[in-house]
Amino acid sequence: MASTSRTRTGRGRGRGRGSGSSSLPPPPSTLPLIIEEFFIVVYEDPLVKKELPKKFADYLDGQEPAKVYLRAADCGPRLWTVEVLFDGQGRMYLDKGWEKFAIAHGVDFGCYVHFKYEGDDVLTVKVFDGTMCRRYYYSDDEDTNDESDDDVKPCIHPL
């Protein structure tokens, strides 16, 4: 019985295309700064204004919005209007309107709140509880914004 042996030819896995021009991306210091996602950890009163990361505030430099619109990732099309405060020191805060959003979505001590900037001053928000598990919500609210009512209509956290 003849033994068959396989011999490998070629350059091997992961070695690139040889001595030609490199297809590696440029080093991080030369890439444009794009801040699309970030999170905050709620260490203090969850209902008071929340500071957003300085890099995100820097990213918006020159486009400092007076308000942003928060959309819970799994809570329908509703947009929550939240006023933005800039302190002149490069820091950005979610201010008036944050309290309603936080109550409706159960933001509490120890929560991680993930933000994704969608453009046009819209931030999609995901809330993770202290066990690092994401909270999922749904809403039976037909409104697409909170301008017309003063009541907090919470999203419902399914058990």
Image (cartoon, rainbow, N blue to C red):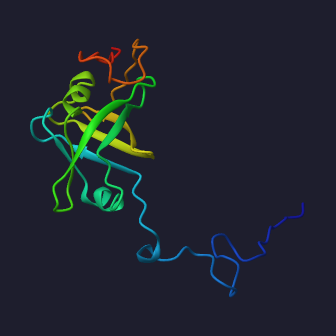
Whether residue 133 is visible to the viewer of this picture, yes or no, is no
Percent across and percent down for residue 105 are 27, 25
- Which quarter of the picture shows residue 155? top left
- Which quarter of the picture shows residue 148? top left
Residue depicted at x 23% and y 32% = 97
Residue depicted at x 32% and y 24% = 147
User: Is residue 67 positioned above or below 100 on the image?
Assistant: below
User: Is residue 146 positioned above or below 118 on the image?
Assistant: above
Percent across and percent down for residue 138 are 40, 18
| 32 horizontally vs 95: left or right | right
Name the residue nearer the viewer: 2 or 131: 131
Looking at the image, which residue sits at the far left?
44
Looking at the image, which residue sits at the far bottom?
19
Percent across and percent down for residue 157 are 32, 18
| 130 horizontally vs 128: left or right | left
Whether residue 107 is visible to the viewer of this picture, yes or no, is yes
Name the residue nearer the viewer: 148 or 116: 148
Can you say which quadrant of the picture contains the N terminus?
A: bottom right
Query: Total marks drawn?
Result: 0
User: Is residue 49 positioned above or below 26 on the image?
Assistant: above
User: Is residue 125 positioned above or below 56 on the image?
Assistant: above
Looking at the image, which residue sits at the far top?
140
Residue depicted at x 21% and y 61% = 90
Name the residue nearer the viewer: 68 or 46: 68
Can you say which quadrant of the picture contains the C terminus?
A: top left
Percent across and percent down for residue 156 are 33, 15
